[in-house]
Image: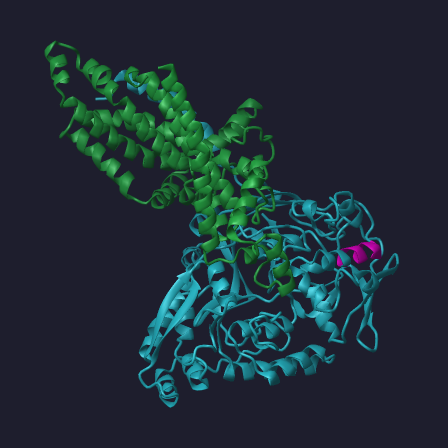
Chain colours: A cyan, B green
Amino acid sequence: MIRRRTFASSLLAAPALWPLRDALAQTPRDTLVMAAQLDDIISLDPHESFEFKGNETTTNIYEKLLTTHNTAPDKIVGELAESWEVSADSLTHTFRLKAGRKFASGNPITAQDAEYSLRRAVTLNKTPAFILTQFGLNGQNATQMIRATDERTLVITIGEPISPSFFYYCLSANVGAIVDSKVVEANKQGDDWGNGWLKTHSAGSGPYVLRAWRASETVTLEANPNYPGQVRSRRVVTRHVAEPASQLLLLQRGDVDMARNLGPDQLKSLASDSAYKVQRSRKAAVIYMCMNQRHPELAKPKVREALKFAIDYDAIQRNIVSTTYDVHQAFLPLGFLGAIDDKPFRFDPTRAKALLAEAGLPNGFSVTLDYSHIQPWSDIAQAIQATFGQVGVRLNLQPGEQRQVITRMRARQHETLMLYWSPDYMDPHSNTEAFVSNPDNGDNARAKTLAWRNSWSVPELNAKVAAAVRERDAEKRAEMYIELQREHQRTSPFMILLQAIEVAAMRAGVSGLDIGPINDRIYYRETTKT
Amino acid sequence: MRRARLASFGGWLVTLPLTLLGLLLVTFLIGRVMPIDPVIAIVGDRAPAELYERVRLELGLDRPLYEQFFRYCAAILSGNFGRSVMTSRPVLEDITRFFPATLELATIATILGVVAGVPAGVLAAVRQGGKIDQLIRFLTLIGHSVPVFVLGLVGLLVFYAKLHLVPGPGRINVAFDDIVTPVTGMLLLDAAFQGEWEVFRDAVGHILLPAGVLAYFSLAYIARMTRAFMLEQLRQEYITTARVKGMSEMRVVWRHAFGNITVPLITVIALSYAGLLEGSVLTETIFSWPGLGQYLTVSLLNADMNAVLGATLVVGIVYLGLNLVCDLIYRLVDPRTR
């Protein structure tokens, strides 16, 4: 029996619960709220940032001289540059800046800012700087090689003649961001070029300004009043929500407008609900498996070919990653100049066994697989283990933390390994160099490409990579990459398995998110909600 | 007696730094033998060889281990905990941001756990074998056995998604971002001190579910231990004597039996509190709570050793501090320990 005193106490306590319902506010009308995993951001200085979410954030704050639109990723367009030209010897590039443009601070954008920014990028020499320093630019020669000749003209001289489009794609990466030199200089400490300040502040001309970044918590952007184009959402708040299940609940309750990391199971639960929609865009990242050529069995060409026929690519895509990956078997992701959609490999255990027998291994062999323990790699690894088992290859799984797996690969301690690779910029040379080029296979090589990490070096292919990056004619260049990919599929120790799909789940009234193939091509400015 | 107290205090003064030094040494060595390259955590996988080598030298990784450790300790003594790779901020600044969030959550969870768990444990012991005892044991068994992340997800699904009783993950609604100036770092206190009652209400709403989940977790342990302690006391002869003398059951249980379990119960509560203070990484992950557990775990997985060592030091100080507080409370509640 409930005592009167207890009942009265409960009645008095009940209103205390009421204010909590007020706390269930929907997202503010002029603010786009996204749930995403934000814990990879280590800096928002565009000349230092190189992580997925860091790049996505800085691309909405800064502009570059050149860029590409996601509707036509193979076409270079001017962002701050009005026009550009290259000398006959392909060494000197001249850019004319647009007139009348301003930074968020109100300062005019001049060629001196562009000069400062690019010199800053190569002198600071942080992680993404290699995108520019590969053209022979560095802290010692930047003052000679990067010069503003007047208020609107910037001249860049590079070290070697290369395909102009290659250079322009690299300038369109976030490391080519143009910063407000006056603001950055006013906040520098010692000779740090303002790096300490710019990690957590902004000085750009893009559609948004950084209002606040709280690590592993939120990133808040506000519309730049000096941006000439339309910016539909006044604020964009990205909340760090590590758990995809929590992201789904937040989306369903209306506490966020968009969830950026839902897995296949969560996406399936939204598929039949008209209150939500899922935007899918092809991404440039690929999942690959590789074979260390220091392993005697894996060094045999017939064994490499056999293992390529021992994976059920379609079943993996259909059963494990149906909404987040597509089967793709070439090192250039679709959407890049010269990318091919050839899929010469399918699961064929009979053929795989025959190839192993030809290689002198009729009873198969044992080999280890290193991979990241998180999904979907864990499920994919088990699927590969099962199909390898059918052809007699005993695959011993060695899951690990992603950085641990990368460390093993850089030390060339793996046998086989599965990982994820995303290009650094929108030019085919990025992935080509990674997957093919290995001019020095020694332990102290400067360039530790993926090919080097697997001890695979083919001088003829190295020469073709070097030739392709110098080719000025776009069509001829594309043909060269097509040939390289087909040769790579036949002979390399790499199995490209899948190409990623960027998935954003959102309320039905949200639209305008522009998702490109790499993280510095994801734009918020057109995003709106009803 | 005074000499004994001074000796005891002196012993503590010696033990504290030695314990912390040992803790740092072990953590440091673990960090160095982990198969994760700390340079990669800073420069990334794509960095050219020159940058990799430059950063490796800047981190002092070319020096012998003992020299690296000695330099780190020397820096700590001058208040320099180094800079975190993951946040780009001084580690000390990070800890002053993340630790209060954990302190707030752990304190409320422990208070709830004690307020519910201790009476539940006493009730279960007094009604041993009965329906109430069985119910309490069943509920505490769930709290003790079910993984905390399952409790958290189920709690979110039921109380947030289905019943709409509490807000979702996070510390505060985005509409209230940056309204309260962080002074203590504990949002409830800061909002109350600054008179931001709407923010306060919102923060209460947000902390209720994660604190409730952790409270259930603590309550289960505290209730079961309380029950075990009480049962042992209730079997003693002095309890029988007290009942025979006609003392009321309430007085027998609370004045006599409970009085004799306060010392071990304080230890149990302190251990439970310390366990929460070091950061419940799974709860913090599910509820997007920016606390020390998540900070420490993400730092460890990224080989961000400055952050790991700094956070480990804080955890060590917390445990030692709680140990000292418990010793002082023992002296207050039990004259025999004076």
Q: Is residue A119 visible?
A: yes
Percent from the top left, x then y, of residue A288? 49, 71
Side (left or right) of B35 relative to B184: left
- Count of numbered marks: 0
Q: Main secondary structure of the magenta part?
A: helix
The answer to which quarter of the image holds residue B44 is bottom right
Q: Foreground residue, B104 or B312?
A: B312
Percent from the top left, x then y, of residue B15? 42, 32
Q: Measured along the vertical axis of the image, is residue A19 above or below residue A360?
A: above
Q: Foreground residue, A403 or A524?
A: A403
- Is A211 contained in the magenta span? no
Q: Specify the farthest residue to the right.
A: A150
Percent from the top left, x then y, of residue A142? 79, 61
Q: Quadrant of the N terminus of chain A?
A: top left
Q: Measured along the vertical axis of the image, is residue B309 above or below residue B124?
A: below
Q: Is residue A256 visible?
A: no
Instruction: Identify the residue shown where x is 53% and y is 24%.
Output: B192
Q: Measured along the vertical axis of the image, is residue A17 above or below residue A118?
A: above
Q: Measured along the vertical axis of the image, is residue B72 above or below residue A468?
A: above
Instruction: Identify the residue shown where x is 51% and y is 41%.
Output: B310
Q: Foreground residue, B48 or A255?
A: B48
Q: Foreground residue, A440 or B135?
A: A440
Side (left or right) of A136 relative to B306: right
Percent from the top left, x then y, of residue A168? 73, 68
The answer to which quarter of the image holds residue B96 is top right
Q: Specify the farthest residue to the bottom.
A: A358
Write down the region rendered in magenta: A110-118
Instruction: Identify the residue shown where x is 57% and y is 51%.
Output: A510
